[in-house]
Amino acid sequence: MPPARPSLVLLAVAMLTIAACETQKKPLTGFDKQPPGSIVLDRGAPGTGAVSLWPMFDLPLEPHQIFRPRLSGQDAVVLTSDEGFYDYEKLYLQGWTAGWASALSGVPPGTYVVELVDASGQSWGQSAPLAISESGSVFTPGVQLPTIVFAHFDDKVASWTIDPALRDADPATDEITVTSLVSEDVVVERCLIASGSPTSCTPVGTVAPGSDLRTVETVAGSLNDDHQALRIRLASDASPAYLRELDEGSGNFGSPACQIERIIFHGKRSEYGAVAMSSCYGFQSGPP
């Protein structure tokens, strides 16, 4: 008597069981399809650009808050794996946030209105249209990134764009705009730094509340030698002050690239003692 043949029904059940047991790749976080209304940042890809963000927010120390950047109304998303999973680009911020920048890399070249929104979708500021061209990333030597500074604290809500394409043709000069966000005059003076201390200061100008002062400064020498610096302070008080060293710096990735800059005098913040921040160096005094 011939052996019995396997039932077709049993064979079909076995095949379904094997299929059900196969591993399906799903993202631990994020989405397996690009979210609608989003733009993908392809970090490190050739032919893309980057933009630097400096949020000046006064937030609770705990817990941190999550913010998402948008480019012309499109949420920025990134690939989280080679399988094509996506997640929103996020900034985790807490406390007084000025002094630390975040960079968006992998941006397709174009002109964008850049915006930051919180977890509920509430806008915390948006830029003027800003051209982002092919520039690599924040680590690309000799490249100054287009930059946006967002202010959202106390009763102040504002943003400023820094477009490196507008710099002058002289690489030995820095074009610096000083902006005052305090309720009294701010003095800008140029001082010789000798033996690490400012001496022989001469006035550059006075910034009225809510106003700007633009100056073009020559950078030369290093911190190890006598050199010039801008000192920015309240008219009523010579200390504390923000010192912008006008030296060439050493730089970790070649020559520092910051020829066009905005320094925002925001007044003393008790957490850090800083009175101003630079769109290039944050609370630091100049090139590293």
Image (spheres, rainbow, N blue to C red):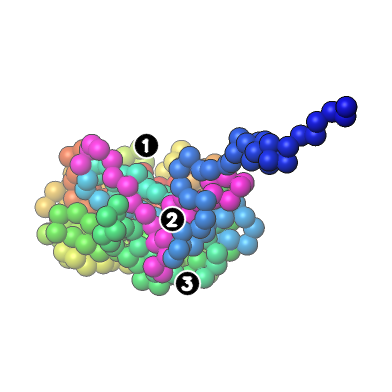
Q: Which residue is drawn at 26% across and 59% down?
A: 122
Residue 241 is at least partly visible in this image: no
Measured as percent of width and height from the top left, residue 247 is found at 45, 49
User: Quick one: label 3 or label 2, which is nearer the N terminus?
Assistant: 2
Q: Residue at x 46, y 59 (%)?
A: 35
> How far apart in space, not on screen, are marks 3 and 1 (Cα)?
46 Å
Measured as percent of width and height from the top left, residue 158 is found at 25, 64
Secondary element type, mark 2: strand
> How far apart in space, not on screen, are marks 1 and 2 (Cα)?
34 Å
User: Quick one: label 1 or label 2, which is nearer the N terminus?
Assistant: 2
Kind of residue at badge 2: Ser
Residue 36 is at least partly visible in this image: yes
Residue 55 counted in the magenta span: no
Q: Which residue is drawn at 16% across and 64% down?
A: 209
Kind of residue at badge 3: Thr
**Closer to the eye: label 1 or 2:** 2
Nearer to me, 98 or 93: 93
In the picture of the structure, the residue carrying the numbered disc 1 is 195
